[in-house]
Image (cartoon, rainbow, N blue to C red):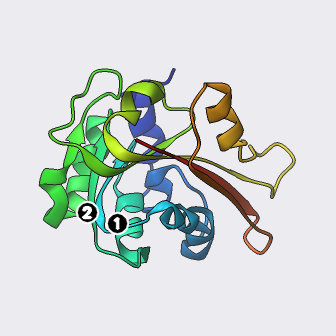
Amino acid sequence: MRTPSEFEQAYLRTDDPRAQSGFRGSAERWEAARRPIVEALDADGTFLDVGCANGLLMESVAAWSAGEIEPYGLDFAPGLVEVARARLPKWADRIWVGDAASWEPPFRFDFVHTRIEIPGLDRVRRWGRRLIVTSDGSFSRPDSPRAEPVADRLRDQGLDVAGELYHRSDEYQVEIGVAWIDD
């Protein structure tokens, strides 16, 4: 497992907000790869992004959602949280440093987003009314990672998947799998 400093070194080599979120490509490609997440939001509410990096996804989900979303973020890399707080000063007090394995949320969220590879999924699941789990990938190069079948992986863990979607953008050469579990 990579350390917080390894993530900081990799993500903070540039001023590009997408690269600081671990993503390569244009704003349009970012939107094609991440916007499907809002389809899992079924109401107004609070949204916690676990592994928020520089906060770009929490900012994007709040902008893209048809409803009122109050974004929050958690990341285990202090340098990334510092960047997120500087980028999003109006939400600085909503972005925390913490590890999903030991962090305790200050309250229960409506929506909690995490990537399939973040450890402690069963623990994170209790932090909100709906857990949204994603996997994304690119198919622009043969060696690029592909989106995993998130819903199948969750079912393999004995979890009851309430909804799922898979989106592929041929124009931007990206794909995303989204699945959610309701409490």
Q: Position of residue 19 (x, y in %)?
A: 50, 56
Which residue does the image show at 54% across and 73% down from the upper left? 27
Asked whether the viewer can see residue 15, the reply is no
Dot 1 corresponds to which residue? Answer: 59
Which is more toward the observer, 9 or 172?
172
Q: Position of residue 77 (x, y in %)?
A: 32, 35
Asked whether the viewer can see residue 114, the reply is yes
Q: SS for tag 1?
A: helix
Q: Position of residue 138 (x, y in %)?
A: 73, 54
**Between discs 1 and 2, the one toward the N terminus:** 1
Which quadrant does the C terminus fall into?
top left
Instruction: Specify the quadrant of the image occupied by residue 32.
Output: bottom right
Q: Residues within 10 Å of mark 1 (few under 14, many from 20)?
A: many
Q: SS for tag 2?
A: helix
Which residue lies most toward the bottom here?
A: 66
Tell which tag, 1 or 2, sits nearer the viewer: 1
State if disc 2 and disc 1 touch (CB < 8 Å). yes
Q: Amino acid at mark 2?
A: Arg
Q: Amino acid at mark 1?
A: Glu
Which residue does the image show at 20% across and 58% down from the upper left? 86
Q: Is residue 80 left or right of residue 18?
A: left
Instruction: Check residue 79 in the rendering and tell me which mark sits there, or answer none.
Output: none
Dot 2 corresponds to which residue? Answer: 87
